[in-house]
Image (cartoon, helix red, strand yellow):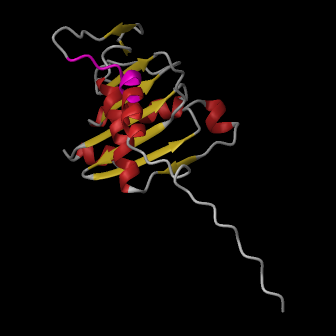
Amino acid sequence: MEIEHAKNGKEARIVAKMNSLCDRDVIAALYAASAAGVKVDLIIRGICCLKVGIPGISENITVRSIVGNFLEHSRIFYFYSDGREQIFMGSADWMPRNLDKRVEIVFPVEDEELKEEVKHILAIQLADNVKAHVLQEDGTYEKIDKRGKQLVNSQEYFCEEAVRKGSSVVNPVKDRIFIPAEAPEEV
């Protein structure tokens, strides 16, 4: 759907976050999407067999790797096509062993509040300019030039955000009163 909309001049985007990308069929589909004009942003911590910057094939694809203090294992797949958003999360990297030889799960995120939270996570990671490295055409990774920019370390940001959110949460256990169940009346 994203490819058709992009070919018709409509906005289309794919954002995917995972540990590894090396499945040939998935890479071919991402190349086809890019060639059609779909903007593809990939956040891949480890192995990435996709080549960026190939004219007419992968010039609309960016790949970033974020390696910080925490070993992340989230897989998030975001698809935008002419105003329609779909978000999926799951256990599978886009690798043959995960897609062909294992039992993995990918599920849609349907709750609107959760969708906003997932989009927030992706936006912060795409803005990371401290721990992120961007894949270059020659296969090397380069740090992002952060001169004159506000520094964004996504892992630090999420830690600080968790502390802020956690300090405002009411502890339901602390205020809970134990009320024993009454014995049933004898018949």
Query: Which residue sits at x=45%, y=22%?
Result: 50
Location of residue 133 (image quadrant): top left
Which quarter of the rendering shows the C terminus?
bottom right
State the extent of the magenta-drawn residues as a range.
150-158
Viewer-side residue, 100 vs 107: 107
Location of residue 71 (image quadrant): top right
Q: Residue furthest left?
A: 148
Viewer-side residue, 43 vs 181: 181
Place of residue 79 in the rendered image (x, y in percent of width and height, measured from the top left) = 36, 44
Query: Which residue sits at x=44%, y=40%?
Result: 77
Q: Is residue 61 visible?
A: yes
Query: Which residue sits at x=41%, y=23%?
Result: 155
Location of residue 161 (image quadrant): top left
Query: Which residue sits at x=39%, y=42%?
Result: 118
Viewer-side residue, 82 vs 91: 91
Place of residue 181 in the rendered image (x, y in percent of width and height, measured from the top left) = 70, 71
